[in-house]
Amino acid sequence: MINSQKYNKFEKNYKELLIKMKQQRKIQIFTDFDGTITLKDIGDELFKDFGIFEPYHSQLVKGKLKIDDYWNVVFMNLRAELNKQKIAEYAQNFEIDKSFLTFFEFCKENQIDLFIVSDGYEEYIKPVLEKYNIDTIRTFCNRMIFNDNGKILPEFVYASESCNCLSASCKRNMVLTKSEPESILIYIGDGASDFCPAQYCDLIFAKKNLAKFCNDNKIPHHPFKDFYSIYLTLKNLISKKKLKTRNQAKILRKKAFEIE
Ligand SMILES: [Zn+2]
């Protein structure tokens, strides 16, 4: 009896949520990959294991090395044995936050747009998504060029001249290109490459350096542990009709479109 009551209540809640979702404006979610979807930063690990990571990474973090120069020097130091196949095999050893799979299903069922925006590289991101059967997620990231002489070079497909942020490819442009005028934009991230794009979004889920950045700059955000906690917060906001555009983000979006 108790169980059936519980189930009925659950079913009622779920139906109400679906009705509210239909009345709701379109939701578009942009999420970082390394350290946000994956448990470890695969990009960092790859360069640690197959090249020279320090002192360059510390110099980058301290602002002594520009991001483009950082990428150029770490790519130059990659071991010659590394190729596309080896990177793919290496990447498939890494794990993702398992609740991301539930989150992905939740988005699909509710017609929520889900995009990955990364300052990492397609060559290791795609194999991870394939491992978990989620490679249908639209992904915006950098690419590697494999030269005949065995050298690998970075290619920043989404680099932006109108932005001076901490990314080689500005994720802001990835977000703005895909955003629709009437949508509510949500950003999920953890690091320096997320500072720029997060500011343009209505709702921000932040941990680690991104949370610190939001605190320092008084940008409202929700802390998160994993994708299950994001799912719970989001579900709650939707059912209470509290998902709204953020004025500051709207103004920034308008300005960016005027400059571009
Ligand atoms: Zn930027």
Image (spheres, grey):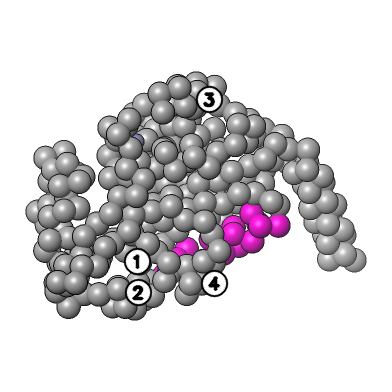
Element marked by disc 4: loop
Gap between marks 4 and 3 measured at Cα: 35 Å
Q: Say few, some or many: other residues with alpha carbon within 10 Å of mark 3 (under 14 / 14 to 19 / 20 or more).
A: some
Q: Residue at x 35, y 67 (%)?
A: 124
Span of residues in magenta = 95-109
Q: Quadrant of the C terminus?
A: top left
| Mark earlier in primary sequence (4, 3) | 4
Percent coordinates x, y for residue 130 in the rendering:
48, 72
Element marked by disc 3: helix
Residue indicated by mark 2: 88
Please, what is the dominant secondary structure of the magenta stretch? helix
Residue indicated by mark 4: 133
Q: Is residue 183 above or below residue 80?
A: above
| Mark earlier in primary sequence (2, 3) | 2
- In the image, 235 versus 199, the foreground residue is 199
- In the image, 138 versus 13, the foreground residue is 138
